[in-house]
Image: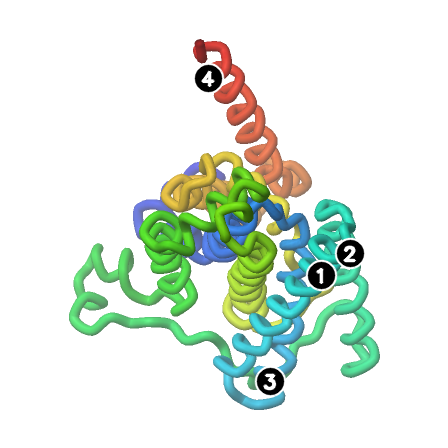
Amino acid sequence: MVWQTIWGQIVDLSLVAVLLRLMTPILLASLGGLISDIGGVINIGLEGLMLMSAFTSIAVGSSTGNWAVGVLAGVATSVLISYGMGFFSLKMKVDIIITGFAVNIFGSGFTIFLMSKIYGMTGNYSPTGAPRIPVVNIPFIEDIPVLGKLLSGHSLMVWIALLSVAFCMFLIYRTPYGVHLRSVGEAPYAAQSLGIPAKRIQYSALAWSGAFAGLAGAFMSNGLTNMFVKDMTAGTGFLALAVVLLGNRNPIGILLGSLIFGLASALATIVQTVPNSPIPSQFIQMIPYVVTIAALVFFALRNKRRLATMP
């Protein structure tokens, strides 16, 4: 029964739609983590940034009746908190890892506090008639039997995430800013001796990280569910950090890694819809995290083999 359901989803291409939806927040957050990692300021706080953006996006979007305003508000909140991380880690010399974990704890607790005080809710906030991020239906292509389901009918944020991969490739490898970013990440004092403003570059890297994490969080509340649920990111930020490692700190590698993790989440989602499934629900929910552990083991073994072959 389980395999018949999964095969049916593959045949009618429903799995592709689920895969793209679940891959999008992982991909966006991973791209944010990539830029900050390349700049030498690894952002452990992606989870908290996504939560703050998700809450702000659905709250502002529902109150204004405009999804775009909500998304921009969520991204702005995430970027502002990222600058705060930069202040504490770069200016006050607080360890960036500790700062990131503090943001995660803050994001989880503060969103619950705001939801309780503003809306009187403790578990979830589901506004009626809240605008959602629109779906893109491509004219003519949507009528083609197979190609239509592959390319049309996906959320606008899916396309933004895919275009962001090309944008990050250009930003990191084809611009002077990208050269400075990589220089600061590899040797900040040497880069500073050459006149590169290392601190400013690292602040901007955290801002880029916050912007992409903000898009990911806004999509989770305004695109995937159209509601805010307590701790709704459910470890997506940490999955994104694993994808950065698995993708070898390269946007194309991160896209492939996000597809793998998105597929694991999609399969878990589909299997949970099977009635009277013989597989325990707890095991199904473990699938994305088991894939994460397997990916990190693969990354460690690959690095060990590469180091062993070095002269």
What is the x, y in percent for residue 166? Answer: 33, 54
The amino acid type found where label 2 is placed reads: Met
Mark 2 to mark 4 CA distance (whole Å): 37 Å
At 53% from the left edge and 30% from the top edge, which residue is drawn?
295
At 56% from the left edge and 69% from the top edge, which residue is drawn?
218
The residue that label 4 is drawn on is 306
Look at the numbered disc 1 and give the secondary structure of its residue. Answer: helix
Mark 2 to mark 1 CA distance (whole Å): 6 Å
At 36% from the left edge and 58% from the top edge, which residue is drawn?
167
The residue that label 3 is drawn on is 62
Look at the numbered disc 4 and give the secondary structure of its residue. Answer: helix
Q: In the rendered image of this protein, does residue 232 appear above or below residue 187?
A: below
Task: Compare marks 4 and 3 and give the one earlier in the sequence.
Answer: 3
Task: Compare marks 2 and 3 and give the one earlier in the sequence.
Answer: 3
The amino acid type found where label 4 is placed reads: Arg
Question: Of residues 60 and 127, which is closer to you in this image?
Answer: 60
Q: In the rendered image of this protein, does residue 222 appear above or below residue 276?
A: below
Label 4 or label 3, whichever lies nearer to me, is 4
What is the x, y in percent for residue 241? Answer: 58, 43
Label 2 or label 3, whichever lies nearer to me, is 2
Residue 87 badge: 1
Badges 2 and 1: C-beta atoms under 8 Å apart?
Answer: yes
The residue that label 2 is drawn on is 92
How packed mark 2 is, by other alpha carbons closer than 10 Å (few <14, some 14-19, many 20 or more), is: few
Task: Compare marks 4 and 1 and give the one earlier in the sequence.
Answer: 1
Mark 4 to mark 3 CA distance (whole Å): 51 Å
